[in-house]
Structure formats: structure tokens, C-alpha cells
Amino acid sequence: VIFSYETEFISIFLDQEHRESHFGINKMVDIISKKYYGIKTSFIVDFVNKCRNCRNFVNLSTQDNVNLVQIKYKYDRYVIDCVDLRRYQEENDG
């Protein structure tokens, strides 16, 4: 049983933590559970879902791991940036 004054305190705590940044549901649950005891996850989920900024936020998808090329000897691999500078051929600014 949760009394009305308890829900007011919970909303104050959630608002206080949420005001710093819009972390999202998982991060807010983690922060609240470390600082406060007995606040249900359903309260946090409802609170974050009501936030307009959090609703508009789109999570970035996780990319695959980058495969690094191991170089054993000097000059095994060259990287060249190809830039078309023909449109600047009439300019000479230094």
C-alpha cells in the first residue's frame, strides 16, 4: 500500500534526479535504486514515459566491432585521402 504523500515524495525525488539530464528508463532505474530504497520501477517507467524530451529521444543502435588491421612492418599499409582540388586551381592564397 502506497499512500498519497509517499507518491508526492517519490515524484519529487524522480523530478530532482531527472532534471539533471534525460537519461532514459534504464539509467534512471539504476540511479534511483542506488540513491533511494523502495521506489518501484513502474513509478520510474511512468515518470520517464511522461517526459516529452525522453519520448522524442531515439536510442542509437549499437554498431559492430571495428576490425583493426595489424601492421607488422613499417609501410605495410598506406592511407591516402583523395581530394579534388581542381576548382581551386585559379586561387593562390598561400
Image (cartoon, rainbow, N blue to C red):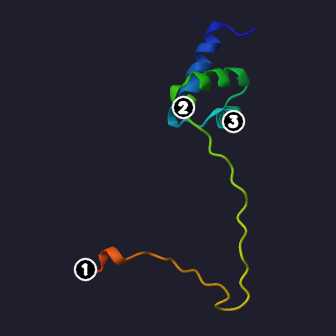
* Alpha-carbon span between mark 1 and mark 3: 57 Å
* Alpha-carbon span between mark 2 and mark 3: 16 Å
Image-based side of 44 in relation to 86, left or right: right
Q: Amino acid at mark 1?
A: Glu
Q: Earlier in the sequence, mark 1 or mark 3?
A: 3
Image-based side of 50 in relation to 65, left or right: left
Q: Which residue is mark 1?
A: 90
- Residue 59 in the image: above or below residue 14: below
Is label 3 in a helix, a strand or a loop? helix
Is label 2 in a helix, a strand or a loop? helix
For this rendering, which residue is in front, 52 or 29?
A: 52
Q: Earlier in the sequence, mark 2 or mark 1?
A: 2
Residue drawn at (72%, 27%) of the image: 37
Residue drawn at (73%, 80%) of the image: 70
Residue 63 at x, y percent in the picture: 69, 54
Is label 1 in a helix, a strand or a loop? loop
Residue drawn at (51%, 77%) of the image: 81
Q: Between tags 2 and 3, which lies in front?
A: 2
Q: Between tags 1 and 3, which lies in front?
A: 1
Q: Which residue is mark 2?
A: 56
Q: Quadrant of the C terminus?
A: bottom left
Residue drawn at (60%, 18%) of the image: 9
Q: Between tags 2 and 1, which lies in front?
A: 1
For this rendering, which residue is in front, 13 or 92?
A: 92
Q: Which residue is mark 3?
A: 26
* Alpha-carbon span between mark 2 and mark 1: 48 Å
Residue 19 at x, y percent in the picture: 51, 31
Tell me the quarter of the picture where residue 65 sits: bottom right
Q: Residue furthest bottom?
A: 74
Q: Amino acid at mark 2?
A: Asn
